Image (tube, helix red, strand yellow):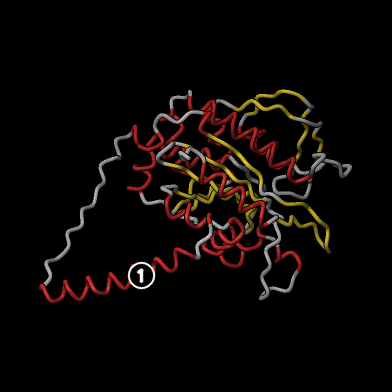
Amino acid sequence: MKTFLKIFVISFLLFTVTIGSGLWAFSKFYHAQEKEVELIEIVESEENEGEKKEENIEKFKTELEKLIDESSRVNILLLGMEGPRTDTIVLASFDKKNKNLDLVSVPRDTYYERKQYRAADKQKINAVHGDLGVKGTKRAVSDVLGVPIDYHVKVTYKGVERIVDSLGGVEVNIPIKMDYDDPYDKPPLHIHFNKGRHVLNGKDSVKFLRFRKTNNGGGYPDGDLGRMKAQQQFMKNALKKAFGFRLPVVVNTVVQYVDTDIPLSEIAILAKDAVGMSMENIEAYSLPGEAITKKLSYFIHDKDEVEELMKQIYKRGKKE
C-alpha cells in the first residue's frame, strides 16, 4: 500500500494547530546543585581539559558538521508505509530562526548496503524498517544525508484519505494518462485518471499518490523521480490550501492517524516557531543521484552532491 509526502502536511498541521490550541505552556527550569569549593575546582579543571579536546576535534570537522553545530534546525523524518516497508521517505528540516522548511525526498529504491542481509531487495533503504524499525530507518537516512535526525512522523493509509477530505480535496495537474488495475490487491485497486487538472478527494488522492506504472508497463517518463515530483506538487498544493484553511477543523483528524515520537512540549515550541510561515519559506529537493539496474532497480545517491545539497540547506537564511 503506497503513501506519500502528505506526511509533511500532517506533521506541520500538528505544529501549527497546537499553538492555536494553547499548548505552549511547557517550560522546564534546571537548577544546579551547590558544590563544595574544592569540587568546583576539580570540575573547572576537567572542563578546561575538555575544551582543549573539543578545540582539537573542531579542527577536523567538515564544513557541513560545523554548520550543523551552529544551526537551530530540527530534522524530522516523515515516513509513509507499505506494510512493513517505507514507501515514502522525506526529511523535513525546519529552521526555527528563519522559519524555513526544506524537504528532501529520498527514493524508496535508494541503495543502502547492509552486509548482514544477503538478499538483493534488502539493500534498498525501504527494507530497513521491516528489519530494524523506525530507529534503523532514522539511522539509515542519517547515514545517506549526513545530518542528524531528531524525530519521526508516520501516517496511516486511512489517515491520508481522511485528512485530504478534511481539507475539502486537493487540486493537482496530472502529467500523464493513468490507467492501472490490480484485482489482487485488498481491496482491488483501480486507478483511472485523464491527463490534466483534477480536484482529488481522499480516495482519489491516495490512488494518485500510489500510482507507479500503467497496465502496459509505462509510467512517469523519469520513473520514481517523476513520482516524487508528482508527490511534491500534491504536497505544495495541499499546504497552500491548509495555510488558508480553518486548521482546527483538520487537527482532530490529524491526531488520530499520526504516529510520532515528538514530545508534546516540542510540538508546542515548533508550533510557536512556525507561526508566520508561508509557501515562500518552503523548498523541496530530490536526493541527488541516478537510477541503475543491478539484479534489481536501485537509486545510487551521489555522496558529494548530497553533501553540497545539505550545506546549501543549512546555509539558507544564514547571513554571509
Residue 282: quarter of image = top right
Between residue 273 and residue 160, name the one nearer to us: 273
**Residue under label 1:** 52
The amino acid type found where label 1 is placed reads Lys
How many numbered marks appear?
1
Along the viewing direction, whichever of 18 and 191 lies nearer the viewer: 18
Camera-side residue: 163 or 16? Answer: 16
Residue visible at 28% across and 70% down in the picture: 48
Residue 309 x, y percent position in the rendering:
61, 47
The quarter of the picture where residue 299 lies is bottom right
Vertical side of 91 occupied by 274: above or below: above
Q: Nearer the viewer, residue 97 or 154?
A: 97
Q: Residue furthest right?
A: 216
Q: Residue at x 33, y 67 (%)?
A: 51
User: In the image, is residue 74 above or below residue 199?
Assistant: below
| Left or right: where 190 falls relative to 313 | right
Q: Position of residue 152 (x, y in %)?
A: 49, 53
What residue sits 24% from the left and 74% below the top?
45
| Other residues around mark 1 within 10 Å, as few (<14) / some (14–19) / many (≥20) | few
> Is 94 left, or right, of 114 in this rendering?
left
Helix, strand or loop under label 1: helix
**Residue 235 locus on image (x, y percent):** 60, 35
- The image quarter containing residue 138 is bottom right
Q: At which x and y percent is residue 126? A: 66, 58
The residue positioned 81% from the left and 31% from the top of the image is 177
